[in-house]
Amino acid sequence: MTVFFVVSWGFDLPKLVPRLRSHNIIYHAHSTGYGFRLPPGIPIITVSRNTMGYGGKKLLML
């Protein structure tokens, strides 16, 4: 069985993601402008094309 952690925005997310890196993580983005970045390799699921564009441009640490 494969398990995924679906994470969304929260004040603790920048600290939580590194702790979960040994697990499968998916980020659920439902709005923009939160000011944190995600490591590459974490899939981003969005609810709109605007959020998808923001996620690709701003959320990834490249």
Image (spheres, rainbow, N blue to C red):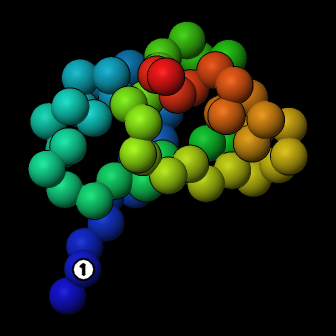
Query: Where in the figure is residue 3, as x and y percent of width and height?
Result: 25, 73
Nearer-the-camera pick, 41 or 10? 41
Q: Is residue 27 left or right of residue 5?
A: right
Is 21 placed above or below 17 here? below
Q: Is residue 8 above or below residue 26?
A: above
- Quarter of the image for residue 11 reads top left
The residue indicated by pointer 1 is 2
User: On the rendered structure, is 51 left or right of 12?
Assistant: right
User: Is 13 positioned to the left or the right of 34 in the image?
Assistant: left
Question: For the N terminus, which image quadrant?
Answer: bottom left
Look at 58% across and 17% down and name the residue there: 34
Q: Nearer the viewer, residue 58 or 7?
A: 58
At label 1, counting other C-alpha atoms closer than 10 Å, the crowd grade (few under 14, some 14-19, many 20 or more) is few
Image coordinates for residue 31, horizontal then vertical, percent: 71, 33
Outermost residue toward the right?
49
Residue drawn at the location 56% of the way across and 48% of the way down: 44
Q: Residue at x 55, y 11 (%)?
A: 35
- The percent position of residue 9, horizontal first and vertical second, equals 49, 33
Residue ranking furthest to the front: 62
**Residue found farthest to the top:** 35
Three-letter residue code for mark 1: Thr
Rendered image quadrant of residue 19: top left
Q: Secondary structure at mark 1?
A: loop
Regarding residue 55, the answer to whether it shows in the image is: yes
